[in-house]
Image (cartoon, rainbow, N blue to C red):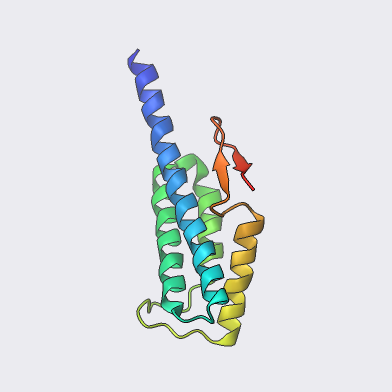
Amino acid sequence: MNQKKDSRNQELKYELLNANIHRDLAQLEATIQYQQDHNWNNETLVTQKLDDAIDSIILHSGMERDKEDILMKMYDYMNEFKVGDEILDVNLNDKQRADYIYLGEKLRSNGWTFNVGYDTAGRLLHLK
């Protein structure tokens, strides 16, 4: 009985961690799209959402050793889009904006949007 409860607690922890990564990546995608649609009027939000997503990936990799390799690859990929250590009052150049637009497209095409969900086995479901 205790083993079943421990197993369920572990599953819940993974679901919450996966939900946090999904939320942060979906917010990043939505923020990139919003900034693109509104002439990049608050570029700092994009860099802040990127930092949130990177933090979630780091936290998750520390708690799931069996998935650490793939999470670190994800971290390395996302980290390429950082524009420096500054997250307050960021001004992006045209190339950086284009890079973020590309990232937003990659996130959307891989299902990291608010238009997806998970089934009971944790598989992505497209809700469009």
Q: Going by the image, does 51 lie left or right of 95?
A: left
Most foreground residue, 86 or 97: 97
> Which residue appears at 45% of the width and 45% of the height?
19
Q: Quadrant of the N terminus?
A: top left
Relative height, residue 34 to residue 19 (above, below): below
Image coordinates for residue 62, horizontal then vertical, percent: 39, 48
Image coordinates for residue 106, horizontal then vertical, percent: 64, 62
Query: In this view, which residue lies farthest toward the top?
Result: 1
Location of residue 36 by image quarter: bottom right
> Which residue appears at 55% of the width and 42% of the height?
117
Image coordinates for residue 127, horizontal then vertical, percent: 61, 44
Query: In this view, which residue lies farthest toward the right?
Result: 109
Relative height, residue 10 to residue 106 (above, below): above
Relative height, residue 41 to residue 54 (above, below): below
Image coordinates for residue 119, horizontal then vertical, percent: 56, 34
Count all numbered tags in the image, as a single digit: 0
> Which residue appears at 61% of the width and 51% of the height?
111
Most foreground residue, 116 or 93: 116
Q: Going by the image, does 62 lie left or right of 126?
A: left
Location of residue 63 by image quarter: top left
